Amino acid sequence: MGLMRFIHTADWHLGMPGGFLSPESRPRYAEARIDAVRAIAALASEVGAAFVLACGDVFDSNHVDRQVVKRAADAMSAFDVPLLILPGNHDPLDAASVYRSTAFTAAVPDCVTVIEGPDPITIGGIEVVGAPWHATHPGHDPSGPVIDALTPGPVRVLAAHGVVDVLSPDATDPALIRMDGLCSALDDGRLAYVALGDRHSATEVNGDARVRYPGTPVATDHGELDPGQVLVVTLGDGLAVDTRPIGDWAFVRLEFRLDGGADVDALDSELAALPDKARTVVRLYLTGTLSVADDARLWTLLDEQGELFAALAVSERGSDLAVMADDTDLGALGLSGYALAAAEDIAALASADGEEQPAARDALRLLYRLTRAGT
C-alpha cells in the first residue's frame, strides 16, 4: 500500500472577539487567524497532502459577523486540495448554522465540503467518516453511533469533536468520547486514525499516537500546550505524524517575586527581552512586598511596557503583592497637615486586608505619581 497523506487541524475559531487584547491589537489578531487558513493551504501543497481535515470550531460561533464569513471563504479559496470541515460545538449544524447561511453558501469555494453526517468521503485512498455536532449541547457523544456502525475495510479516518473521557475530570458527562471505543475500532481495523478537535493543546491522547488533537493553529489562551501548529498525517505501512508550525502568536505567563527595586528592574528587563511583543499576550503573577515608591515605579513600567505588547495584565487571582508604606515613603510625598493625615489613613488601608485594600493601593500609587510629578 502506498503512502497517503493529509493535514489534521481544528479549532480555527474564526471571528473570536479577542476582548482580552488591546483595541489596537484585535484587528491584527483577527487577521492572523485568516492568515493561518492560507498558511495551512500553502502547507498542504508543500507536503503533497491529499486533503485537509478541520475537526470542528472552524468558526467561533454560528453568529459571527458576515464579513468574517466572507473573508474566511475567500481564504479557503487558496486550497488546491479538498478541505473537509466538521461542525463542532461552537459551530454546530443547528437551525442557525453558519454553514447554511447565505453568506457562507454564496461564497464558499468548491474545494470545501462540510461534513453533515456519517456518510464516508473517500479521497486519495483514505475514507473519512465524520461525527458532526448538530447542537451546542447534544447530550450524547456524536461519534459513538458512527463508530458502532463501522466494519473493517478501507484505510479509514474518524473525524470527531469533543473531550475524550480519559482527559475529563467529569466521567459522567454523556457527551464524552469513549477512549475504549476508539481503541477497539483502531485495534480491529475499523479505523486507522482518529482526528479530534476541541482541545486547544496539541495532544496525543493517553500516549496513543493514533488518537490526536492538533491544537489550535493560532494560540487563544494561557496554559495551552504547543498551540500554533497542525499535524501532517501519513498513513500506509504504519502511521507517521509530523507537527508543522502555523501561528506566531504567543501567550506568556511570568511569575515574579518582588521585594524591592532590584526585583522591579529584573521584571522590566525580562519584559523588554521578550520577542515579537505585538503578537505576545503576557499575564503576570506577582507576589512579594514593595514600598510605595517601588510599587509606583512598577506600575509606571507596566504601563509603558503594556503599550508594546498585544496585552499585558497582572492576574488578580494569582497575585499577592503587598504595598507597605513607611515613614520614609510618606515623607517623600512632601505632604503636611490634613493631607499627610489622609495619606497615613490610606497607607493603613493599603497595608491591611479588607475590601478597601485594592482601592487604597491605587490611591497611594496615584498620590505618589502626582506628588512626584511636581518635583
Image (spheres, rainbow, N blue to C red):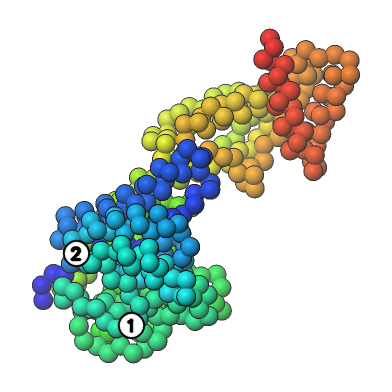
Using the rendered image of the protein, determine whether residue 13 is visible from the camera's viewpoint: no
Q: Secondary structure at mark 1?
A: loop
Label 1, residues with CA under 10 Å away: few <14, some 14-19, many ≥20? many
Residue at the extreme top: 375
Above or below 306: residue 340: above
* 199 relative position to 291: left or right: left
Question: Residue 370: percent from the left, percent from the top?
Answer: 70, 19
Q: CA distance from mark 1 to mark 2?
A: 21 Å
Question: Residue 254: percent from the left, percent from the top?
Answer: 51, 40
Mark 1 lies on residue: 118
Above or below 159: residue 253: above
Q: Residue type at mark 2: give it.
A: Val
Q: Secondary structure at mark 2?
A: loop
Residue drawn 50% across the image and 78% down it: 138
Residue drawn 30% across the image and 79% down it: 129
Question: Residue 146: percent from the left, percent from the top?
Answer: 36, 84
Using the rendered image of the protein, determine whether residue 361 is visible from the camera's viewpoint: yes
Question: Residue 108: percent from the left, percent from the top?
Answer: 29, 64
Q: Quadrant of the N terminus?
A: bottom left
Residue drawn 70% across the image and 27% down it: 365
* 223 relative position to 240: left or right: right
Residue drawn 32% across the image and 65% down it: 106
Which quarter of the picture shows residue 40? Answer: bottom left
Number of marks present in the image shown: 2
Residue 141 vs residue 58, the one in the foreground = 58
Mark 2 lies on residue: 81
Nearest to N terminus: mark 1 or mark 2 = 2
Q: Residue type at mark 1: give it.
A: Pro
